[in-house]
Image: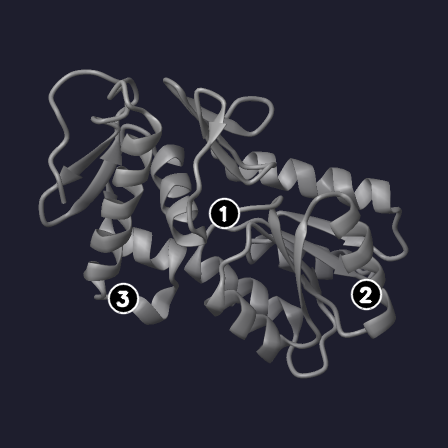
């Protein structure tokens, strides 16, 4: 895991898309581009982004359809970017699950601010004002797309990062394997519980290696046959291995 937050920019106008990609990369984002709905869906399935910047006027399908499909799979923030001015368009996008709506023309500073807010909210209600999730020595920083233990970065794959995000955002609550699959892999992978098993095992090993004092040993608890949960506070009985 490296770089800043991963953003999927879905925009059919080449000049606009390239300008957005250039500005966002300059602000630390890892940018993937899609010129139409079909490409956006392939990018989404191949590597789940941290935030989506989506133009509604796509050549092959209405952007609202993508909002519905993306929201069905995960809680990834979606910021609409569109030249449509009618209020009903904005309301429908928001009702389908978009997090914000930026109307063209727009200022890059405003767009960046909207994206930062969306990323902070993605941490869930347990995140601090900076969008960080903190458990003992572990800090999960949504905005910087970084996990640290005692200030030292932990090298996680994108899937491991997303699993940890889902678990931390639901600290203290049981998260089923099915919910993890939908949030991290998408609807097409339902029933592939082994994917979760393997990635949670790898995640545990990496956190243990980053914390030789063993404070994170009990962080992820297995509920056999059902799923996982993250302890709201460390200590207590050791978590079961998956």
Quick check: 82 above or below 60?
above
Q: Secondary structure at mark 1?
A: loop
Asked if the residues shown at circle 1 and circle 2 are in contact, with their CB atoms under 8 angstroms apart, the answer is: no
**Mark 3 to mark 1: distance in Å?**
25 Å
Q: 227 or 135: nearer the eye? A: 135
Residue 83 in view in this figure: no
Look at 26% across and 38% down and name the residue there: 204
Residue carrying label 2: 18
The residue at 26%/39% (across/down) is: 205
Residue 148 appears in the figure: yes
The structure residue drawn at horizontal position 54% and vertical position 72%, both measured from the top left corner, is 41
Residue 90, image quadrant = bottom right
46 lies left or right of 14:
left
> Dot 3 corresponds to which residue?
190
Which residue bears the numbered disc 1?
1
3 or 2: mark nearer the eye:
2
């Amino acid at each position: 895991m490296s770089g800043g937050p991963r953003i999927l920019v879905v925009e059919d106008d080449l000049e606009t898309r390239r300008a957005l990609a250039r500005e966002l990369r300059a602000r630390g984002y890892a940018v993937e581009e899609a010129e139409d709905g079909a490409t956006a869906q392939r990018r989404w399935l191949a590597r789940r982004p941290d935030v989506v910047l989506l133009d509604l006027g796509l050549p092959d399908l209405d952007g609202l359809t993508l909002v519905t499909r993306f929201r069905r799979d995960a809680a990834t923030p979606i910021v609409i970017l569109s030249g449509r001015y009618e209020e009903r368009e904005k309301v429908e996008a928001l009702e389908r699950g978009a997090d914000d709506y930026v109307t063209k023309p727009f200022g890059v500073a405003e767009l960046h601010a909207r994206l930062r807010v969306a990323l902070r909210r993605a941490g869930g209600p347990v995140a601090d004002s900076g969008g960080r999730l903190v458990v003992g020595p572990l800090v999960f920083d949504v905005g910087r797309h970084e996990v640290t233990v005692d200030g030292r970065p932990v090298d996680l794959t994108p899937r491991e990062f997303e699993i940890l995000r889902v678990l931390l955002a639901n600290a203290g609550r049981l998260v089923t394997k099915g919910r993890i699959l939908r949030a991290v892999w998408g609807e097409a992978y339902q029933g592939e519980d082994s994917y979760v098993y393997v990635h949670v095992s790898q995640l545990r090993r990496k956190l243990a290696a980053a914390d030789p004092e063993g404070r994170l040993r009990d962080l992820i608890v297995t509920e056999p046959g059902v799923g996982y949960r993250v302890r709201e506070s460390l200590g207590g009985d050791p978590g079961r291995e998956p």
